[in-house]
Every structure is written in C-alpha cells, then in structure tokens.
Amino acid sequence: MTAWQPVVGIELHAQLGTGRKLFCADRAVFGAAPNTHVCPVCLGLPGALPTLDADAVRLAIRTALALECTVHDRSVWARKNYFYPDLPKGYQITQFEEPLATSGSVEFDSSDGPAVVRIHRIHMEEDAGKSVHDRIAGASAVDLNRAGIPLVEIVTEPDLHEPADVRAFLQTLKRILEYADVGDCSMEEGSLRVDANVSIRRTGDRGLNTKTEIKNVNSFAGVERAIQLEIARQIEVVESGAAVRSETLLWDDHRGVLRFMRAKEDSHDYRYFPEPDLRPLRLSADLIASERDALPELPRARATRFRKALGLSAYAADVLTQTADGADYFEAVANGCNDAQSAANWVMGPVQALMKEHGSAAGDFGIRPDRIVELLELLDAATISDAIAKKVLRWMLEESKAAGTIVSERGLEQVRDTALLVDWIEEVLAAHPGEVERYLDGEAKLVGFFVGRVMGRSGGRADPRQVNALLRDRLRA
Amino acid sequence: MTAADSLERIRREESLDSGLNAFVSLAGVRAMETAVGSLSEVGRGTAGNERGVLGGRFVAVKDNLVTLDLPVTCGSNMLAGYRSPFEATAVRLLRKAGGIVVGKTNMDEFGMGSSTENSAWGPTLNPHDRTRVPGGSSGGSAAAVAAGYVSMALGSDTGGSVRQPAALCGVVGIKPTYGRVSRYGLVAFASSLDQIGTFGGSVHDAATLLAVISGHDRRDATSANRPPLSLADIVADPDAQGLAGITIGVPVEYFPDTLDTEVRSRTDRALYHLRAAGATVREVTLPNTDLAVPCYYVLAPAEASSNLARFDGVRFGQRVSAGSLLEMYQATRGEGMGLEVKRRIMLGTFALSAGYYDAYYGTAQRARVNIRADFERVFGQGVDLIFTPTTPSPAFRIGEKIDDPLAMYRQDIFTTPASLAGIPAMSVPIGSVQGLPVGGQLLAPWWEEVTMIQAARVLEATMNAS
C-alpha cells in the first residue's frame, strides 16, 4: 500500500448538439471561417438581449437524467463577470447558486471492479469565443463563432483515486452522453472539455487537502498522463517538506508537461449575481417526464441485459454497447436471427471489421441489419459455408445486394450432392496415396488434410460436415 | 409643420448660445421627408387604424435607444460615432405607426444622473429657465417636448429618468409596468429596472406613444406576454363620472417635513381636484419608502457594473491603444467614461465582490422585496392609485448638485420605489412655482396603466381649467 492516496474530481464541459446558440438564433458549427456565425446578441452589441433556446434546455435535462441527477423545477441564470477579449459581454451567462440539477451518480468499471462517482451538480451556460494567439504576428485574434454555444458543465465529487480510473470513468461518461444523444462529445473539436482537480492525502485520511486544477487537456490519454504527473509532483512537494499551493496548471500535450498558469490568489472574483435579462428557468414536471421517456436504455443497463437475457459474455456485452447505434445494430441482428451468440460473433467480428475498413459506423454502415439476418439464415441452413459467408458479406457491401441474390448469382450454394462429393473425394485420395497409407496406419488427424483438399477442389462450396462424414466412411473401408 | 420647417426651427434655435442642447443628433431633412412621403394611407392615420395612429408626427428618441439611421452614443465618449446594425423594438414600432424620428436626445451618460449634466456632449438646459437643469437622465427628450420641438418623445426610466425630467420640464412622462415595453435595443443601464417610457405635451400624446410601443417581444425575455395596451382605452375621453369609485392613496412617507412647501401646496391642490372629480382620497403608508434610494443605489450600480463591461474597446466604440491588454482596457474605459459612470461602476463592483455580496447586494434585494410588498399591501386594500409629488423640489440650478452625488441621488426619493416594485408610474404637471413646473406622480398596480392614464387626464383637464 502506498503512503499517499490521490483524490481527483472532474469538471466536464459538453456542448449540447442543438446546432444553435443558447441565447440567439445563430448556427453553432465547428470549423467555419472566423466570425461568420455571429449576431448582435452573441457579439454583445449595445441593446441586444438574450433569449433562451428551449431545445438546449431539453438536452440539458436529458443529460442530467442520464447521470441520475435530480432536475430542479426552478434554476436561476447568473452572470459570471470577467474581462477578456473573447468574452463579448464581459460576463458569461451561466448558473451559479441554483443550478439545473444536482446529486447524480455514474457507475463505471474501475481497476477494483464496479465503482460509483457521484455527480455534484450540472448547470447550463454559454461558451466563450476563442482567442487565437498564433495567427497574426504581434497580435491576438478573436473568433466569436463559438461564443454563445450551449454547454452543460458536469461537476463530480472528488471520488476518483487512480489516473487510469479517471480515464475509464470519462470513457463511461462520454458513452452515456453519446447514448443520450446530447451532443458530439468530441474532444478534438472541443465539444467535450475536461478539467481535473487533483490533491493527495495520506492513505486512510478522510479530509481533502489543497488541490490544483488541470486545464486544457484534449484527450482522455492526456487526462490520465497529466494526472499521473501531477500526483507525482504533489507527492514530491509534500515529501520535500513543502506544501502544495492552490494553482491552475495547463497541460501541454505536445511536450507532455504541465505548466503553471495562475495562482489561486490571482484568480478572478467573478462577482456572480442573478442574470436580470432572463427569468428563472422553470421546468414543468411534464417536460422533465417527457425527457425521461425520451432517454434510451443506457449503456450499463444495456450491457447487463445483453449478458443476462441474451447470454453474452461480459466482454461481448461491453464491446457491443460501445455505441447506441452499434448496440441497436446488434440487437436488430440478434432479434432477426434468433441466435444472439451467432449475431454477436458476426457483428463483433466480420461486420465490425468491414465497418472499420470503410470508415463507417453502425449508424451509417451500408449493410442494414436485416440483410445480415438473411446472411446468417443462409449460414444456419447450411446453404453456404462460413468461409463463403464472409466473402458474401463483402460483396453485399460492394454490390449493395442481398445475400441470397449474391449466392444464387455466383452459384455459391453448398454442394451436398453425394455423388459429386464422392467424385471429389476419390480424386483427392487418388492424388495422395502416401497420406492415405499413413491414415490407415493410424494417423487419424490426417482426415482434416483430406477435408481441406476436398474443400479446395470444390471452391469452398462443399459442405464440410458431409465431406467429413463421407471421407471417414470411405477410409474405413 | 413640414419636416424641413421643423428641423430648421430646431437647428436655428439650438445653434444659438442659449440653445437647449436637447439633441445629440438630428435626422436629415431628406430622410424625414422620405419617411413622411412613404407613409401609406394607413400610416397617415386616415384609415383610423391603430397602426397609423402617429400619422407623420415627429418624435424625439433618447440616445440610448439604437436606431439604424442615426448614431447612438448614450451621452458617452465611449460610443462617439457608434452606429447600430439593428433597431430597438420601440423605435421600429413607432416608425411602423407612422412616427417620424426627428433626432436623438441628450441624456446623462448611460442614464446615470438626474440632471443631464453628466453628458459627454454638455448639459441640456431647462426651457423654463435656462440656468436650470431639465432633470435626467432623459433630460433631452423632456426639454425637446417642453420646447415644442416635438409633441412626443421616447425616454427610459430606471429610477425616475422619465418622470423626474417630465416634472422639471412641465410635461407628461410615463413609465409603464416593467415588461410592458420591450427593452430590445435599449442600451442597458440596470436591466431589472430599465423600462422605456414616453413623454408628451399632453397625457393623450404620451399615452398614445406608449400604446404604440407596448406589447410582447420575443427578443426580450423580460417582456410580458400580454397584448399591447389598447389605444381605444387609453385615449377614450374621460368618463363623464370622472373619478367616481376610484380610491387614491396618499402615502405619508412622500410628504416629509423637508418637502418644499410650494411643492406640497401644489400637490394638495391637485388632490383637491382629484377629490372634486369624484375620487376618494385616503392616507396610506408605505413604510419601506426610505429604503428605496439606498436599495436603488446598490442594485442599479451592481447591474450597471456588469452591463457596461462590454464597453471595453475590443469590438466596437472607442479604443485607446496601449501596451498590454489590461492597459488598453484601463485607457479605453478611463478616457471613454465620465466620472459618474466610473463612480457607479466602482460602487456596483464593490457591492458584488466576494465577501461583500450578501451585505450589499443581498441586503438590497431583500429591501426590494419589502418595498414591493408595501405596494402589494396598499393596492390589495382597495386603493386603485397612489398620488405623490414627483420630485422633492422644482428644477435646481445647473452645477448646484453636480459635485454632491448624495444630494443628486436624493432627487430620486419619490421615483425609485415604483422602479424597484416594477409598477407603472407617471408624472403630470400640477402647476408651477415662480415659473418652474411642478409634477405630481400617479402610481398604479402592475398592468393598470389605463386607470392611471385616465386619472391623469382628469387631473390634466382640471389643471388646465383652473
């Protein structure tokens, strides 16, 4: 047991995928030419006023419900005041004293088995614009396309203790958000942003010590690495007899180092107060209930059901529930063919391999599940062999045809005509007299060799079980 | 009078040394003539439609309302030359009703002041005595109406900025219920208090303009989802029965010993007339009245400190270049903003600071609840309207209070309570003292503008007759 226990809490910002800004009608798009999606409201021009987009509220409610939070029927918008060129109004509209939701939880698989991270609160807010410091020599540029994009901030309790667990937790959380379909959740595009609060304490202690905040991490691997480094640094500081100072650190992903950003005493006094331009957000019980109804089965529940009801392994259940679309795809196949195991093997194996090869996902893959069901039915009826079926799958995608069409067009049905099979067997045995002798001398495993030769002779179409049986019969004589 | 005549008169009189300095910018003759010419039959009002009710009448607009054809400066160097890419809802509605915007009127910088002395473009003079202030912050609009340049004007009222200058200039000024008129396009001073109001040479004119600009606007989340005020109700001739059945409350707190005796006597005379018109007058108490000014001068600066943060030199308005970002902010805001604006930003920033928030902002919010509760109680006890003096004294001299902020803030003792409660209130001329106008203030329950305006018309008629 180590002497120090790391304590980590997460603050995660997720963009809500409404396609619109939170307080005006501008579109929210990634990668557009700078300052092309702006209007008087998100530019903070004199006289402009915010008006709330109801869709963003619905997605925020859904987020909160997916994380098992209590959604409050009243929450209050607040202004967070600070000066920065990419903050047009000089304040960010957020929620402070009365947030949208509180007291949730997320279950995930930690290194020690199932664990729970409590969600402290979830609130809505608008994004700031983006400052660009390397575009124009000697000056900074500001792009306000992002200003006003709707966000939820999810704040956890400090329930995490291992860097690897933080990563596993974040993957679980991201998967939940994707299932709930609340946004893109892309760290690369900045639609998911993670800050980590890190402290250490003596193993066995319960209290919390001074924490540092890590910002600017743009991958889960980066989060894990940054927290590892910060924990090591804090241990070194404390063991050298010094104290950890409250400060904000920036993760430099390029160099893999943490850089000092500011000390606590330099941090802003944000002068929060209730936003007078917006009435408190009141949510009816009906609205909350309708979002609860709209919530799909979440990944953990789905994986459990796949294990218990469909008899899949924990591994298969986990792989098949990575995305909601993928799980839907699998379930459609499994329900269609009434053989969950075979469906799981095919979807996790050849189907996913083909998706990967074509850079597509379950949602946009060129072969719909019902066509996979048809393929599996041909396989099940022994109309085609396993090897042929894999080839047929590829042709289905390339030619956009049903399995049955491809099989009949190419004459791929398994050959079960005994006379023809016997002819091929005789041919193979005649060509390999030495192996026949060795078999007859007791080298029984050579039957596989003969089957393989016969299959080859048939172009893969011979029914291998029938060939096997016929061969054994023939060689017994 | 044609557009050209009207503009010519304003230009001629305003160019004199004794000019009022009521306007910050004036529309061009051609722009006004085009606007007049483009009025449809409906726009001219010949169709008797509400939309055309202003039918070519000239309207002045306070310079904190954004307009497409004229600059908007809010009386500040910060916005010298600034042009808005959109137009305030109230201005759009008045144009739609056939109103012709003559120009933008002078004001205390960003609405902060009670004398229009805090304008980067110099003070506006009171038409009744050019050594005196017209009140503020909408002093330019009040003076323009009082001088007869226009018959109606738009202002904004945060703690009395329509009613107090109306009283000091001897015109009618109405501040409607908070939420009655869209604030979209009104440059914010204190968002929870700001409300666009109207001036008129008569109750009829001020009320007509109010009806035109009222109504729900989806661009302002605090605008009430109610239909516009009915013009028919508002301009209907006063009932033959006068004010029979109407109970008017007179709050003792608005008649302190320090009240100017002449103001008191004019108010008493107005009450006599109201009683003569059939109203029942009865004494009421609003015990939290003395909290209003301190409460207002915490909340309004707090909101202002945030609302004015956008004037940072980054995206629009004046920028004073300096070395670092912080130095640019300091130079831009230091040079662009006047003393009173800086004072209020400092006050408001302090009131919202960690460690002081609850003692100042929190306490003021609780006081606001109590002030509102006073009105709820009185209006719940059968009182239909409240009548008070609008200001504690007639117009004071230019320079008299400008170096004494607290004396200036005390100008607002009778007007801030209605702002904090969000109720409608208006000032009506009730006589004069040595040539200086005195205003009486009518206060009504939330959304009861019609009753208030009808009582004001009765009062106006009796005052005119006497």
Image: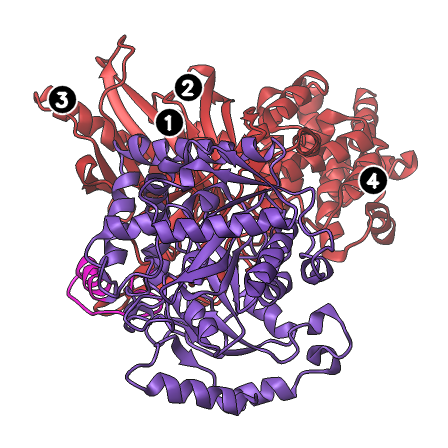
Q: Earlier in the sequence, mark 4 or mark 2?
A: 2
**Mark nearer the viewer, 3 or 4:** 3
Q: Are marks 1 and 2 in contact (CB under 8 Å)?
A: yes
Identify the mark at residue A238; answer none if there is no mark: 3
- Is residue A216 placed above or below B201 in the rendered structure? above
Which quadrant is home to the N terminus of chain B? bottom right
Q: Which segment is the magenta one?
A: B311-335
* Label 3 to label 1: alpha-carbon separation: 23 Å
* Amino acid type, callout 1: Ala
> Helix or strand or loop: what does disc 3 sit on?
helix
Q: Earlier in the sequence, mark 3 or mark 4?
A: 3
* Label 1 to label 2: alpha-carbon separation: 8 Å
Q: Tell whether B90 sits left or right of A247.
A: right
Quarter holding residue B296: top left
Q: Which residue is the site of mark 1?
A: A164
* Label 3 to label 4: alpha-carbon separation: 64 Å
Which of the pair B446/B91 is nearer the observer? B446
Q: Which residue is the site of mark 2?
A: A111
Quarter holding residue A453: top right
Which of the pair A65/B269 is nearer the observer? B269
Q: Residue at x 51, y 23 (%)?
A: A104
Q: Which residue is the site of mark 4?
A: A374
The red-tinted chain is A
Q: Earlier in the sequence, mark 1 or mark 2?
A: 2
How far across and how far down the image is residue B429, in percent? 49, 60
